Amino acid sequence: MKITAARVIVTCPGRNFVTLKIETDQGVYGIGDATLNGREKAVVAYLEDHVVPLLIGRDASRIEDIWQLLYRGAYWRRGPITMSAISAVDVALWDIKGKAAGMPVYQLLGGASRDKVLVYGHANGADIEETADAVGRYIDLGYKAIRAQSGIPGVKGAYGVGRGDLYYEPADDALPTETLWNTSAYLDFAPKLFARIRDEYGMGVELLHDVHHRLTPIEAGRLGKSLEPYRLFWMEDCTPAENQEALRLVRQHTVTPLAIGEIFNSIHDCRQLISEQLIDYIRATIVHAGGITHLRQIAGLAALYQVRTGFHGATDLSPACMGAALNFDMWVPNFGIQEYMRHTPETDAVFPHSYHFDDGYLHLDDTPGIGVDIDEQLAAKYPYSPKQLPIARLEDGTMWNW
Ligand code: CS2
Ligand code: MG
């Protein structure tokens, strides 16, 4: 089966998505997500200028060899742009292989290890009361696991407070929104938030929290310790994790489980975190970490150390990524949880998909491939629109981590 064409489709049904579509001489095609939030055009150029010309005429069934060609052949290895582009090719080829075999991708990986995929949703509010109410609404919707984020008194634009309940979206048009950060206010506030939520809803729901790279290791240790009474499922991205060794210090101070990795793009970003058991969940995901082919290696390493998967699944990862991730989640032995932020109805219409939410889980059917398509005519109605993620500064103006 020969690759005859590969095209990059950019669409903005409320937010930008980059999709690679690969066509073959047998009429079977596949799609893969290549969206890198706020830096979308860099991946478009990488794909169009440097990857697509290499694909034409190749055997679409040789997924591993094409992965190696794009990784080793570029000479310049790793990095979010390269790895997002490789991922898009990889997922599109798995999609083709599944369609050609008449099987969902999880069957090709080794078959289902579970019947359905546990997900967590995002409850957020301007203050503790609003956030507690939002948690209640998610419980009513059937969610078994809920991430809670709240506005913090004295912190302008705290991370995770959305503009809508179900469709949180942080990116803004043109220039980045400036937010403020205050670590002391946050460290005093966060335990009160979770005390309030546990008080109202008891221990029967899993609670998660995203620190979004804001703390130093010793501060993260303190936060983890202060949240222990509320038994979090995980505390996410407590420090920027370029320095993997730093997590040792966090571990020495808390038994709150740790999840890291949504901005990782290679196994080398998390090798030490995993092999020293410095984290409990690895969040690297299909679109930004080299596709199914590379995630299989990361998950295999993680399994040796009882680290489980918890893939990133924010709205800036398209339904094509979600379809690939869910197929992976159905198979991977050391599955933990899958993040699920609902896409808007406009996005769902551009990307018809076979997965659906019911009673706290996402469910897949037998649709061959990744189970997600793109409606190109509809996609064309939503042209690219420049977007930027917010930035954060301390009160004296110092740049901080958003
Ligand atoms: C977040 C994301 O979902 C998460 O855990 O950290 O909302 C993240 O901020 C965005 O995906 C950035 O593109
Ligand atoms: Mg996160």
Image (cartoon, grey):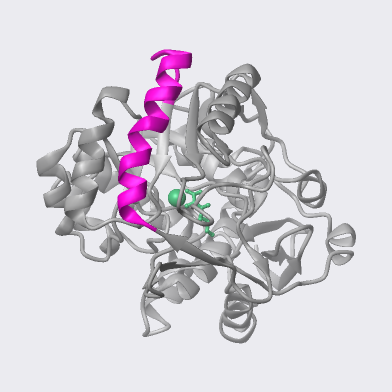
Q: With 62 as the anchor, is 401 left or right in this view? A: left
**Residue found at x 76% / y 72%:** 384
- Residue range (magenta): 182-206
Q: With 303 as the anchor, is 113 left or right in this view? A: right
Q: With 312 as the anchor, is 389 left or right in this view? A: right
Question: Is the C terminus in the top left, top right, bottom left or bottom right quadrant?
Answer: bottom left
Q: Main secondary structure of the magenta part?
A: helix
Asked if residue 88 is positioned above or below residue 250 in the image, the reply reads below
**Residue found at x 58% / y 41%:** 126
Depth order, front residue of 70/215: 215
Q: Is residue 184 visible?
A: yes
**Residue found at x 57% / y 66%:** 389
Inspect the magenta stretch and tell me whether residue 261 lies in it: no
Inspect the magenta stretch and tell me whether residue 191 lies in it: yes
**Residue found at x 55% / y 66%:** 390
x, y percentage for residue 373? 75, 50
Depth order, front residue of 356/94: 356
Q: Is residue 334 visible?
A: no
- Among the 4 quarters of the image, the one containing residue 8: bottom right
Depth order, front residue of 402/48: 402
Depth order, front residue of 186/207: 186
x, y percentage for residue 38? 59, 70
x, y percentage for residue 153? 46, 46
x, y percentage for residue 82? 47, 75
Numbered label tally: 0
